[in-house]
């Protein structure tokens, strides 16, 4: 049985939605998705046998347009993280990416704390409960989907001091 090429493997994991179900007909990545919500694609193994993964949107760019210069981002015009449609992608610096996000209202003002912080995983109610609960840090970490260190920092008021 013939092995699929990288090109065949990649595009077999894409659903081309050229209809009204997504903005401007995004092509949705159906393969693995990382914790950040972006698709991931396995590129094979390096010389040491270690698996190599890349963002699916970056692979789509490379397959259609060629190599991405060092330190350059592949950004989404459509803001759909699992979109790999080449026409929805553009290259930019980290600064370009942040300007684009800010222009589209996807950034929070700096200095935000608590729930208003863009990276917050907990609510103020969660923090209040964590501080009043006698359960172990490990148990609370599992329950709230954070680390035991996060629970410890909340209880010691190293974080979420404003509550």
Image (cartoon, rainbow, N blue to C red):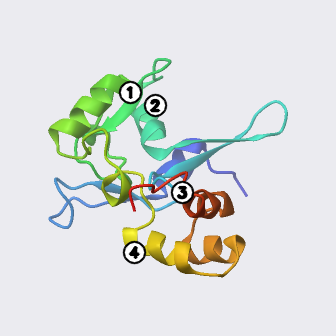
- The answer to the question of whether label 3 and label 4 lie on touching residues, with beta carbons closer than 8 A, is no
Closer-to-camera residue (18/23): 23
- Which residue appears at 70% of the width and 53% of the height? 2
Above or below for 112 versus 90: below
Closer-to-camera residue (73/22): 73
Q: Point out the image quarter for the C terminus.
A: bottom left
List the single residue furthest toward the top: 69
- The answer to the question of whether label 3 and label 2 lie on touching residues, with beta carbons closer than 8 A, is no
- Which residue appears at 64% of the width and 74% of the height? 142
Numbered disc 1: secondary structure: helix
Q: Earlier in the sequence, mark 2 or mark 4?
A: 2
Q: Earlier in the sequence, mark 3 or mark 4?
A: 4
Residue at mark 2: 62
Residue at mark 3: 157
Q: Earlier in the sequence, mark 4 or mark 1?
A: 1
Of circles 3 and 1, which is in front?
A: 3
Of circles 3 and 2, which is in front?
A: 3
Q: How many neighbours does mark 4 have within 10 angstroms: few (below 14), some (14-19), or many (20 or more)?
A: few
Residue at mark 4: 125
Between the C-alphas of marks 3 and 1, the distance is 50 Å
- Which residue appears at 42% of the width and 23% of the height? 72
- Residue 105 in the image: state x and y as whole percent: 18, 45
- The answer to the question of whether label 1 and label 2 lie on touching residues, with beta carbons closer than 8 A, is yes
Between the C-alphas of marks 3 and 2, the distance is 46 Å
């Amino acid at each position: 049985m013939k092995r699929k090429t990288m090109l065949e493997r990649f595009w077999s994991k894409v659903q081309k939605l050229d209809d009204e179900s997504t903005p401007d007909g995004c092509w949705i990545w159906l393969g693995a998705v990382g914790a950040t919500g972006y698709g991931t694609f396995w590129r094979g193994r390096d010389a040491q046998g270690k698996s190599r993964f890349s963002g699916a949107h970056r692979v789509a760019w490379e397959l259609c347009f060629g190599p991405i210069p060092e330190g350059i981002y592949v950004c989404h015009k459509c803001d759909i993280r699992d979109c790999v449609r080449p026409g929805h992608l553009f290259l930019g610096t980290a600064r370009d990416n942040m300007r684009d996000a800010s222009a589209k209202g996807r950034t929070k003002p700096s200095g935000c704390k608590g729930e208003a912080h863009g990276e917050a995983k907990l609510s103020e109610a969660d923090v209040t409960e964590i501080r009043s609960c006698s359960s172990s840090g490990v148990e609370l970490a599992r329950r709230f989907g954070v680390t035991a260190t996060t629970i410890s920092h909340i209880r010691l008021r190293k974080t979420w001091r404003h509550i």
